[in-house]
Image (tube, rainbow, N blue to C red):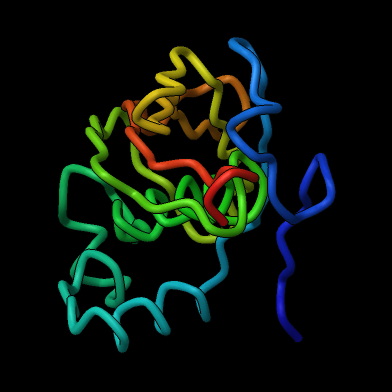
Amino acid sequence: MFARAIDNQPRGTICIEDLEIGMTRYLLKTVTDRDIEMFAEVSTDRNPVHLDDAYAQDTIFQGRIAHGMLTAGLISAVIGEQLPGHGTVYLGQSLKFMAPVRPGDTVRAEVKVTAIDHAKRRVTLETHCAVGNTVVLKGEALVLAPSRKFD
C-alpha cells in the first residue's frame, strides 16, 4: 500500500501571468519506512542513521530519521505539480535543515510566492516543511515559470 500525498489544490500549471505575491500551495505526506528505503536505493545514500534502528539509536537523533533530501523533495513536488506547476524549471534552492523527520511523521511542504520578475519569467518562492508546529526545513527557491506567451 502506498501513502499518497494530499494536495491543497489540483495539480497542473499556473502561468506566470496568473501568479500573485502571497500565493501559497502545500502538500501533506506521511513519510514511511518504504519511502526511506526507496530513497536510499535511488540516491545510493545508505547511511545507517536512515536504515538501521540499532545504529541510529546511538546517534544524536536517538532513532532513525528520513533523508533530508527526501523531505526537500516534497518542496520540489509542490513546485513542479502546483505552484507554478507543470513546466516549471528549477534555477536554484537554498535549504536549512532545522529538525529531523522520522518514519511515520506527516510533513507539510509549503511554498509561497515572494517575488515575480515577469521580464525574465523568474519567480522567487519561500519554502518550508513542518511536522506539526515544528519547522524541519526552510529555504528559498528560484524558478523559471511557464508562460502562455512561450509555452
- Residue 131 is left or right of residue 102, and the answer is right
Seen from the viewer's position, the closer of residues 149 and 117 is 149
Seen from the viewer's position, the closer of residues 72 and 35 is 72
Q: Is residue 126 visible?
A: no
What is the quadrant of residue 119 in the picture?
A: top left
Q: At 46% across and 18% down in the image, what residue appears?
A: 116
Q: At 18% across and 76% down in the image, what residue appears?
A: 45
What is the quadrant of residue 44 in the picture?
A: bottom left
Callout count: 0
Query: Where's residue 70, x and y in %?
Result: 38, 60
Q: Is residue 116 visible?
A: yes
Query: Where's residue 62, x and y in %?
Result: 28, 49
Q: Tell me if residue 74 comes above or below residue 134 in the rendering.
A: below
Q: Quadrant of the N terminus?
A: bottom right
Seen from the viewer's position, the closer of residues 44 and 11 is 11
Q: Quadrant of the C terminus?
A: bottom right
Q: At 30% across and 56% down in the image, what residue appears?
A: 69
Q: At 69% across and 50% down in the image, what residue appears?
A: 13
What is the quadrant of residue 97 in the picture?
A: top left
- Residue 84 is left or right of residue 40, and the answer is right
Query: Where's residue 20, x and y in %?
Result: 65, 16
